[in-house]
Image: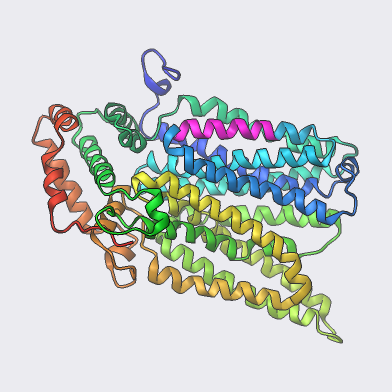
């Protein structure tokens, strides 16, 4: 097996070190995402680029070339929805990275608009596949206590990639000729090489393997990730929980055609539609919080705009690190609500300042315009802490085992579609409404606070199987009065259930029981499935 060393799997890495290397691969994936997303903003204002493609002054064509990348990302996310559960997490990322490589080469070698458009779309498709797959892979190979932190780290690396792209393009803005834009585009191959060097030898998602009936491989990977023997009761308890969730999903699965039709009844099991909507909603909130409105709103000279973007990206990166410890301490709900409330405040102040900036005869127009820039920076602080990472983390946690990759793909598709919509309407909105356009985003952010408070269950400090069980046993869409749904700490009943399961596996020959379970099923699981406490789904 690739990655074996002296008969040892994964070059001998186990436990925390193995999780570390999975995180390196996923974080590199998201760094590539951030770099690829940000680099073109510096490329499209480069004189040689505009002259080579013969689009000097053609703002419509420049916008089209830029926006088509987002469309490619959307279709890449749709592709991940289709192929993700067929190929698995590793193969999906490998294919996505290969497609991105082709797209990057096409962009680097472009001498015409059609050539560049094809490169942008192809690169977007690869990125859409990757960004739909990396968070579920990380979530499914991480312990509950670390899952949130690790995915937030991934998204911080996304910001790092974005920041790096700003500084690279700013630095190359002093260089004449085609190297000023072709080399920044080629720089992304550093991340592509890292992905090719890590992904092939890392472990597949054990939950995906269980879903495919490959129990022995899943058992071994769980043991390797925890640095324990496969006979350990904790490993057997985890495997049993994953099998239970997989079997329950299989028996109560809702087909895609039934999801579209809104079908209910005996085919339902774990609130599939509700969970899909919650995950997609978190990505909707990220884009409709107005992050891309601010990016397009400030007008400076070319070089000053590059410098401010680069400096702001560093501030954005530094403050986003606050989210690493807080994502488990505060929980996902509070992170989203705090961020939305802070962003609403910033937009209210920005709206007021820009109102006076445009007020005829007002004596301090320049001063209030400068003050508005300070609140643009403050907005990025709130966004970086809460709204940058959690919307990508949440779909990977909230969706059921059989829908996890599909749910993440739909969430990513929602993000890219909303991104495209906002990028298209923002110039029109600013031209038509002026300062009043910003009121819309203040209202959106204000509305997100009660939306999260009433409808979004907490997922921090819970195993993915805890979340599955919550939806099996609870159908009330309002979660604000349910302590099991709002506590940032793992509910006591889940801890007690896990301890009982571990004790049960400690009292038997765990290997024999595991083999018997594979062949005949688990009587305890069968009894539990018949328990009246497990309800049919309401969708």
Which residue is at the front of the view, 104 or 6?
104
Q: Is residue 220 above or below residue 27?
A: above
- Give residue 129's quadrant in the image: top right
Question: Which quadrant would the C terminus be assigned to in this image?
Answer: bottom left
**Residue 498's spot in the image, x, y percent?**
20, 47
Q: How many marks?
A: 0
- Give residue 188's quadrant in the image: top right
* Residue 328, visible in the rendered structure: no
Left or right position of 477 against 122: left
Examine the residues drawn in magenta and state their main secondary structure: helix
Which residue is at the front of the view, 348 or 437?
437
Instruction: State the residue at coordinates (44%, 46%).
Output: 406
Q: Is the image coloured rainbow, by chain, by secondary structure, or in one colour?
A: rainbow
Question: Which quadrant would the N terminus be assigned to in this image?
Answer: top left
**Residue 141's spot in the image, x, y percent?**
38, 38
- Is residue 343 a member of the stretch shown in magenta? no
Instruction: State the residue at coordinates (66%, 52%).
Output: 314
Instruction: State the residue at coordinates (51%, 74%).
Output: 447
* Residue 116, visible in the rendered structure: yes
Left or right position of 504 against 167: left
Write the start and end of the magenta stretch as one range.
88-103
């Amino acid at each position: 097996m690739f990655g074996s060393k002296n008969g040892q799997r994964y070059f001998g890495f186990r436990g925390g070190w193995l999780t570390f290397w999975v995180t390196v691969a996923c974080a590199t994936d998201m760094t590539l995402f951030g770099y690829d997303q940000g680099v073109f903003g510096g490329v499209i204002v480069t004189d040689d680029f505009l002259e080579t493609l013969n689009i000097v002054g053609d703002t419509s064509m420049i916008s089209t070339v830029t926006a088509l990348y987002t469309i490619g990302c959307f279709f890449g996310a749709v592709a991940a929805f289709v192929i993700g559960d067929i190929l698995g997490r590793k193969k999906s990322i490998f294919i996505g990275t290969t497609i991105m490589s082709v797209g990057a080469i096409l962009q680097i070698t472009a001498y015409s608009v059609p050539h560049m458009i094809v490169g942008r779309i192809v690169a977007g498709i690869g990125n859409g596949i990757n960004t739909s797959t990396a968070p579920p892979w990380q979530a499914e190979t991480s312990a509950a206590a670390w899952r949130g932190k690790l995915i937030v780290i991934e998204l911080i690396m996304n910001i790092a990639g974005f920041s790096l792209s700003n500084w690279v393009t700013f630095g190359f803005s002093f260089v004449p000729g085609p190297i000023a834009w072709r080399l920044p585009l080629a720089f992304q191959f550093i991340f592509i090489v890292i992905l090719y060097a890590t992904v092939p030898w890392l472990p597949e998602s054990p939950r995906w393997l269980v879903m495919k009936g490959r129990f022995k491989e899943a058992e071994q990977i769980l043991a390797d990730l925890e640095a324990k023997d496969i006979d350990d009761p904790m490993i057997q308890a985890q495997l049993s929980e994953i099998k239970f969730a997989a079997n329950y999903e299989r028996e109560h699965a809702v087909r895609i055609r039934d999801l579209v039709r809104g079908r209910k009844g005996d085919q339902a099991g774990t609130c599939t539609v509700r969970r899909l909507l919650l995950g997609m909603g978190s990505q909707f909130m990220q884009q409709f919080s107005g992050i891309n409105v601010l990016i397009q709103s400030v007008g400076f000279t070319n070089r000053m705009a590059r410098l401010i973007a680069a400096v702001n990206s560093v501030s954005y990166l530094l403050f986003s690190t606050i989210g690493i410890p807080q994502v488990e301490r505060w929980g996902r709900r509070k992170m989203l609500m705090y961020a939305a409330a802070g962003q609403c405040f910033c937009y209210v102040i920005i709206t007021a300042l820009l109102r006076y900036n445009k007020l005829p005869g007002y004596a301090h127009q320049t001063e209030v315009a400068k003050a508005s820039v300070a609140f643009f920076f403050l907005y990025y602080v709130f966004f970086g802490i809460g709204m940058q990472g959690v919307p990508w983390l949440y779909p990977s946690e909230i969706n059921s085992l059989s829908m996890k990759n599909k749910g993440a793909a739909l969430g990513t598709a929602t993000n890219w579609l909303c991104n495209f919509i906002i990028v298209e309407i923002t110039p029109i909105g600013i031209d038509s409404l002026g300062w009043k356009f910003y009121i819309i985003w203040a209202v959106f952010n204000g509305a997100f606070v009660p939306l999260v408070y009433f409808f979004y269950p907490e997922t921090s400090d819970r195993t993915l199987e805890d979340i599955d069980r919550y939806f099996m046993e609870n159908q009330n869409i309002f979660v604000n009065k349910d302590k099991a749904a709002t506590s940032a700490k793992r509910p006591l009943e889940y801890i007690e259930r896990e301890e009982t399961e571990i004790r049960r596996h400690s009292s038997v020959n765990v290997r024999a029981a595991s083999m018997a379970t594979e062949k005949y099923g688990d009587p305890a699981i069968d009894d539990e499935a018949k328990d009246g406490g497990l309800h049919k789904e309401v969708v």
